[in-house]
Amino acid sequence: MSGRAKQLLAILQRDIAENRVILPSLPEVAFRVRQLTADPDCSVAQLEHEITKDAAIAARLVKVSNSTAVLRGKPVSSLHQAITNLGFDLVRSLVTQLAILQTMQHHKSDARMRGFVAGSLRISALSHTLAGYQKHLDPEQAALGGLLHDIGKLPLREFLGQRAELNDQQRLHVEQILHPVVGALMLRRWQMPEALVEMARHHEKILRESGQARADYVDIVIAANLLHYGTESGRYAHYAGLDIPALNKCVHGHAEEQVHQTTEERMAMGLNMIDA
């Protein structure tokens, strides 16, 4: 990390501690649903009551539950049916994703934000596909981690935008360096599983070797990023031709074309999340 980036991180951390910078909160509906589904005594009726407090989320959950990527049994027409069909674990993941995407959509007029949302959805879909090849990993957790892995960029953009001493190129450079740290900080505040925190914190360590033969969630999001952005040009071009442990673990035995094809169905579901 460069000296300038370290200095700016220290300023940001101080401003957060002194409430001069307020990190975004996890949307209330997502927070409450995560609380409820952690309670073994939670009922479908309780969960339905909580979700209906946000009519937009409730409507989108019903629509998403009828997408081919998650449809279980017959199509549903009510929130109660959707919760029953999907199960609490999947409802928790989907409501969290829907709520975060809804928050991002408030800025959809911003071209850069639209690109951020589209990229996050693609990484999420790829993460779901790659985790599906690993029997020991949960594809839904991987999908949520893929959606959130770059979340640190959002508060950083506001913070760096106020630094008059930086030009646009410098802001982008510092954002790229610091967003994993800030993302991990946010996800810890949101009480997300440690696996998701690690995905945010380490997803830019492209040559990372975990020391384990099997892929972990960080390997999944690294591989998803590389498949999405490629190494022919752009941000990861300097990794072209190198042996990358995450790709070896996550994609070995699966043609990239097959991975992308499988991802399209999940991506269609993601588009339902923002278009419902």
Image (cartoon, rainbow, N blue to C red):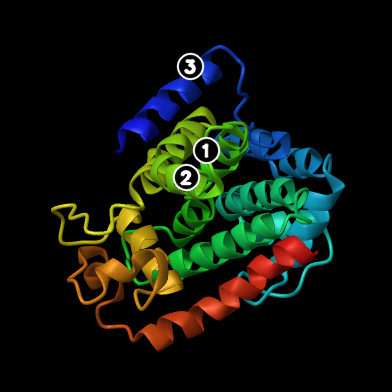
Which residue corresponds to the image point at 33% horizontal and 70% vertical from the top-left?
237
In which quadrant of the rendered view does residue 136 lie? bottom left
Relative to residue 134, is residue 52 depicted above or below? Answer: above
Q: Earlier in the sequence, mark 3 or mark 2?
A: 3
In which quadrant of the rendered view does residue 163 lie? top right
Q: Report whether residue 255 is seen.
A: yes
Mark 3 residue element = helix
Residue that badge 3 annotates? 14
Task: Please state which of the two labelled residues, at mark 3 or mark 2, is closer to the viewer.
Answer: 2
Relative to residue 36, is residue 171 depicted above or below? Answer: below
The circle drawn on residue 73 is: none
The circle drawn on residue 166 is: 1
Q: Looking at the rendering, in which quadrant would you find the C terminus? A: bottom right
Residue that badge 2 annotates? 170
Relative to residue 65, is residue 24 depicted above or below? Answer: above
Graded by Cα atoms within 10 Å as few (under 14), some (14 to 19) or many (20 or more), the crowding at tag 3 reads few
Question: Residue 268 in the image: x percent, y percent?
Answer: 65, 75
